[in-house]
Amino acid sequence: QVQLVESGGGSVQAGGSLRLACAASGVDPRHTCRAWFRQAPGKEREGVAAIYTGGDSTYYADSVKGRFTISQNNAKNTVYLQMNSLKPEDTAMYYCAAAPGSWYPTLRLADFAYWGQGTQVTVSS
């Protein structure tokens, strides 16, 4: 049984930083695309960052390039999202997701079979 558990969300002022973590069980830590998505109220879920766990290939949405960094610890089967220079428009529920069998980083929603419950990130101005 696959389980993804996010942690690390919270409230921060604009310009601040947060680090999210997503611990996985039941997912191959070596050959999986792991990613972060976010969804703000009234908006569609959008991809933020992805990493292929078999190497270190990453992919970022344009809106977070240079501010967010996705990384992994395969021994812990955990993926992290370091978020710096946060903006009010980054406010959303952040979800981690896994696409087993995907051998490259992707943010295509349909590729992801497993999702966490989400963690809230709120950035105030």
Image (cartoon, grey):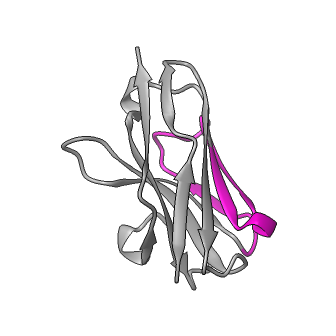
Q: Residue furthest top?
A: 125
Q: Position of residue 102 (x, y in %)?
A: 56, 80
Question: Can residue 124 be seen?
Answer: yes
Q: Is residue 77 magenta?
A: yes
Q: In the picture, residue 40 is in which quadrant?
A: top left
Left or right, residue 86 beside residue 29: left
Q: Position of residue 90 (x, y in %)?
A: 42, 34
Residue occupying image coordinates x 52% and y 78%: 2
Q: In the picture, residue 58 is in which quadrant?
A: bottom right
Q: Residue furthest right?
A: 75
Residue occupying image coordinates x 68% and y 61%: 78
Quarter of the image that includes the C terminus = top left
Left or right, residue 76 beside residue 109: right
Q: Is residue 95 magenta?
A: no
Q: In the picture, residue 79 is in which quadrant?
A: bottom right
Q: Residue furthest left?
A: 42
Question: Can residue 104 be seen?
Answer: no
Number of residue marks = 0
Which residue is more in the foreground, 117 or 31?
117
Q: Looking at the image, is 93 positioned above or below residue 74?
A: above
Q: Position of residue 47 (x, y in %)?
A: 43, 55
Q: Position of residue 13 (x, y in %)?
A: 49, 17
Q: Looking at the image, is 104 positioned above or below residue 68?
A: below
Residue occupying image coordinates x 42% and y 78%: 113
Q: Looking at the image, is 87 positioned above or below residue 27?
A: above
Residue occupying image coordinates x 41% and y 58%: 117
Magenta part of the chain: 54-81
